Image (cartoon, helix red, strand yellow):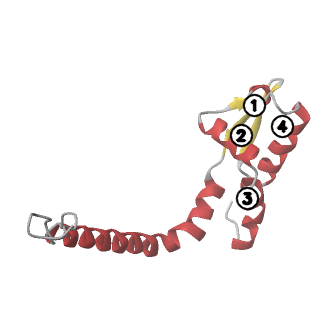
Amino acid sequence: MERKPGDLDDVWKALSDPTRRAILDLLRKGPKTTTEVVEAFLHLTRFGVMKHMDVLRDAHLINTREEGRQRINSLNAAPIRQIYERWVSRYENFWANTLLGIQDDFEANRDFDRSTPEKGPAKGPKKGKDQPK
């Protein structure tokens, strides 16, 4: 299903919560039953996990299918890819070029520092027998 750019708001909302991102990370490892997802978040109630999963499902970030009495949840990375294509890829060349420029400047300064003779600690005139103390 292709989305319009404005339709990604629900995806951004879903990704804005650390618990929902953790659920997606769990599902990235492979499909899980709803019970397995709930058991991975013991600090939350079953109801709380289910609400997070509803937000993810509404954003089309997870797919759920029924197998007998179980619901199997899996990651749908397509909306994340759409965000990447819309927001990240457009700036990829800019940031790559900027970072390469910073690296070039750093290396040029490092090479410049290496080419200048190192100065030791400043030494004053030697105090000897001839000079006043």
| Residue 37 image label | 1
Q: Which of marks 3 and 2 is nearer the N terminus?
A: 3
CB within 8 Å, label 2 to label 4: yes
The amino acid beneath tag 3 is: Val
Q: Earlier in the sequence, mark 4 or mark 3?
A: 3
Q: What residue type is labelled 2?
A: Ile
Residue linked to disc 2: 23
Q: Residue at x 29, y 72 (%)?
A: 104
Residue 40 relative to residue 29: left or right: right
**Percent of width and height locating residue 112:** 20, 73
Q: Quadrant of residue 130?
A: bottom left
Report the front residue among 119 and 46.
119
Residue 131 against residue 22 in the figure, above or below: below
The earlier-in-sequence mark between 2 and 1 is 2
Q: Quadrant of residue 80?
A: bottom right
Residue under the image location 69 percent in, 59 percent down: 1
Q: Residue at x 33, y 68 (%)?
A: 103
SS category of the residue bearing label 4 = helix
Q: Which amino acid does label 1 sit on?
A: Val
Q: Is residue 113 left or right of residue 3?
A: left
Task: Measure the alpha-carbon separation of dots 3 and 1.
Answer: 20 Å
Marks 3/2: CA–CA distance = 14 Å
Q: Tell me how far mark 1 sits from mark 4, CA to CA.
A: 8 Å
Give the residue type at disc 4.
Answer: Val
Q: Are marks 2 and 1 in contact (CB under 8 Å)?
A: yes
Q: Does residue 77 appear to the left or right of 131 in the view shown?
A: right
Other residues around mark 2 within 10 Å, as few (<14) / some (14–19) / many (≥20): many
Residue 73 placement (x, y as % from top left): 73, 36
Where does label 3 land, which residue?
A: 11
